[in-house]
Amino acid sequence: MEMCALAGQAIVSAAGFLLCAVAPLVGANAATPSPAAELAVATRADPYPVAGEPFEITISAEVKLAGPVVGTVPVPQVSAPDWAKLGLRVLSEQTSFRTQAAPSGTTCVTQLAVRVVADRPGTIVLPPVSAAATLPSGDVLRGQSQSCKVVVAKQPASGGAPRSARTAGRAKLVAVPGLVGLALVPVATLVFVLWLAARRAQRHGAVPEQSQERELAELRKLAEQENAAEFYARAVPRIRQALAQRCGFSEAGLTTAEFVAELGAHCPDRGLVGRVEQCLTVADGVKFAAARPRPADLFHDLCLVETILRDSRPQREE
């Protein structure tokens, strides 16, 4: 009997040992391991805005996972700086989020687009921006962008001839003999009629708003698909044409450097010129060097294209 009791205790002890050894393995297998992940944060802004004129600051937080997401999709949360302490007035603020799954991994991007105004010229240093994302396993990824410098230029002086020159011109016009003045009336009328006809023809030849919105929707889809080659192949000719028409010069046959120089000579908005130069430089890298821009850069350039094309729409006739 004593032998049977000792044997029973030995069996119970062995069973308990096996349960203690197996329990951690079961717990480890039940947990959902997160794939390898990284969080990148970037801040971009117009490098040379003008005091009193709006410009855009874009903050992007991008999570890259080495495999598919199992469970809750990690949404990066961005901690924006205090814009008022930086001397900036916020006109609008928009946050967007997108995710894209691919065999090579999953990308989750949060983008904060802020339209601001600096009332005074000077140098503004945008501080590093922090972001965090919670993975399905419960682990928290943290990242921080680098600081960004913005040089705000003075408001450009209004164009036009000096007051003395305009006054002299009016005096000479009054001194014209009566018959010559009457002869100028039909000429002025003819010039006005031709100008009005050209303006109407330009308006009728412009791309309708619905067609332009479809075009922008296609560009946004290409940016979401990270198809940089097709995105820039379609976007660059449109913004070159729109800016050249708006500023009154021909962009045909101009290289990127020549186009930027011509735009800088005709456009007083230095911030816009700087953003266009960045966009065209990235486009050249994609076209000639097979560069692969980040999704955040694609969406930043998409916002630029949308702004240029919508601002270039002809005004509707009342």
Image (cartoon, helix red, strand yellow):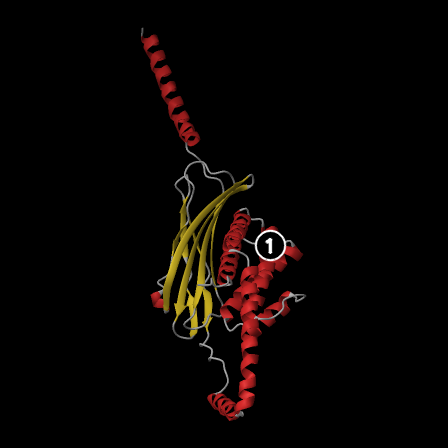
**Residue depicted at 38% across the width and 23% down the height:** 19
Image position of 89 (left or right of 261): left
Q: Amino acid at mark 1?
A: Arg
Say how many tags the image has. Answer: 1
User: Which type of secondary structure does the marked residue at label 1 adopt?
Assistant: helix
Front one among 266 and 294: 266
Quadrant containing the C terminus in the rendered view: bottom left
Image position of 9 (left or right of 277): left
Front one among 19 and 227: 227
Mark 1 — residue? 234
Image position of 81 (left or right of 288): left
Quadrant containing the N terminus in the rendered view: top left
Residue 129: x and y in percent read 41, 58
**Residue depicted at 50% across the width and 82% down the height:** 160
- On screen, residue 17 above or below 57: above
Which residue reaches farthest top? Answer: 1
Front one among 288 and 252: 252
Residue 247: x and y in percent read 55, 70
Residue 89: x and y in percent read 36, 66
Residue 204: x and y in percent read 55, 60
For label 1, the crowd category at 10 Å Cα-Cα, with few meaning under 14, some 14 to 19 and many 20 or more, is some
Quarter of image, res 128: bottom left
- On screen, residue 221 above or below 285: above
